[in-house]
Amino acid sequence: MKEGYTLVYKRPDTLLKTRMHYCPGCFHSILHKLIMEVVEEMGIQNDVIGVSPVGCSVFAYDYMDVDFQEAAHGRACAVATGIKRTLPNHPVFTYQGDGDLAAIGLAETMHACNRGEKFSIFFVNNAIYGMTGGQMAPTTLEGQITTTSPYGRDPKNVGYPMKMAEMVSQLPGVAYCERVCLNNPANVRKAKKSIRKCFEIQAQNLGTTFLEVVSNCPTNWRLSPIKTLDFVENNMLKYYPLGVKKDVTATEEK
Amino acid sequence: MAAKGLVEISVETCKGCGLCVHYCPMKCLAINEADTNSYGLHYAQSVEPDKCIGCANCAVMCPDGAITVYKQSN
C-alpha cells in the first residue's frame, strides 16, 4: 500500500500469478479475471469447482486458484452435472468456448440446460475456433472469412450462426440466461454483475444459469486488439444483441 | 481539483495490447515503442501520471491484470 493512497483496483488474489498464454488483447483473460473477482468477493474460493473445456481456455485451471476438473472436448456440462449432483452444496461452473459448447458439446449443453442442472455455464463466443487456427465455428457470422470459409461464410451451404443464448433461454430448466460483452469498461462492469447473479441464482437452486460472453480473437480475425473492438461493436453485437434473455427471479418479483 | 490517481503497471505481465491506452479518458497512458520486456513485447506505461484521475478503466480492461490503481486519500 502506498503512503497517502487508497487501493482502487488490483488483480484478484484468486487469480494465480502465472502468466496467461492468451494472445495480447484476448477477452478470455478478462473473463478469467472477472470470475475470480466474483469468487473472491463472494468468499467461495474454497467451495467453488470449475470445469475447463478444450479450446483456447483449456489451461483455465492453471490460472484460477480454485478446484478444477478438465473435461473431454464438449463434455464440460456432462462432467459438471456429475460434480454438482455429487456435491450439491458446492458452486459449480463450466467455462467453455464456442467450439466446445456450440459444436461438439451442443447435445450435452442443451440436455444439461433442459434438465435444469444447477450449475453456471460461462460461454465465450468469439465466432471462430481460436486454438486450432481460425476455422469456421457454428457462431461464425455470415460472410466472415475464416481459414475454412475463405470466401466468407455462406449460409446456403453451412447454415446460419447459432444464437446460443436465445436457444437456451427457451428451455424450461434454465433459470437465468443473459448475453454480455467485454468490449468496453462499462460492459465489463456489467458482465461482472451478471457473473455474480449467476452464482447467486445457482445458490438458490433455481436451475441452470447461462451467460454468453461476446468475445474477440485478435489473432484469427487478423485484426489488432483495438480494431477487434470495432468489429465486436459493428458486427458481433448486431447479430448477437446483448441483454437478459430469461430471468426467473424477475418474474417471481412481479 | 480532481482527486489524483496513480497506476502501477507490471512490465513483465503486460503484453502491450493497448486496451488500457484506448480506454484511458485522460490519455495518460502510452505503449512504450522503444523498449520491450523480457518476452519481447512493448509494454504500456504512464506517460502523464499527473493527469490520472484513478477511474480504473485501464485496470478493468487489462486482460492480464497487470495494472494496479490507487487514489489519493483525502
Image (spheres, rainbow, N blue to C red):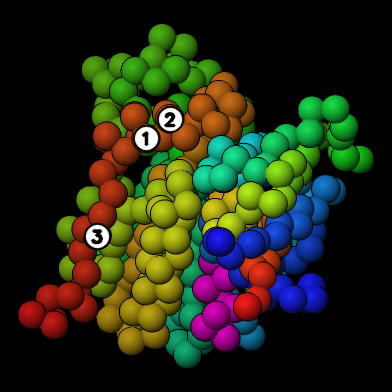
Main SS of residues in magenta: helix
Above or below residue A167? Residue A77 is below
Three-letter amino acid code at the position of disc 2: Asp
Residue B41 shows in this picture: yes
- Give above or below for B68 relative to A183: below
Q: Are marks 2 and 1 in contact (CB under 8 Å)?
A: yes
Q: Is residue A22 left or right of residue A111?
A: right
Query: Which label was assigned to residue A244?
Result: 3
Residue at x 43% of width, y 30% of height: A230
Q: Is residue B73 left or right of residue A2?
A: left
Which residue was labeled with disc 1? A233
State the image coordinates of residue A92 (x, y, percent, origin top left). Answer: 49, 75
The residue marked by circle 1 belongs to what chain? A
SS label for mark 1: helix
Q: Position of residue A107 (x, y in %)?
A: 35, 53
Q: What stretch of residues is rendered in magenta?
A: A35-44
| Three-letter residue code for mark 3 | Val
Chain bearing mark 2: A
Q: Is residue B45 left or right of residue B36?
A: left
Give the foreground label among 3 and 2: 2
Give the structural element (helix, strand or loop) at label 2. helix
Is A202 colored magenta in this rendering? no
User: In terms of depth relative to the viewer, which is nearer, A29 or A188?
Assistant: A188
Mark 3, Cα crowd under 10 Å, few <14 / some 14-19 / many 20+, is some
Residue A3, image x, y percentages:
80, 76
What is the three-letter code of the residue carrying label 1? Glu
Q: Is residue A202 above or below residue B15?
A: below
**Within-10-Å neighbours for mark 1: few <14, some 14–19, many 20+:** some
Q: Quadrant of the C terminus of chain B?
A: bottom right
Q: Position of residue A41 (x, y in %)?
A: 55, 80
Residue where numbered disc 2 is placed: A230
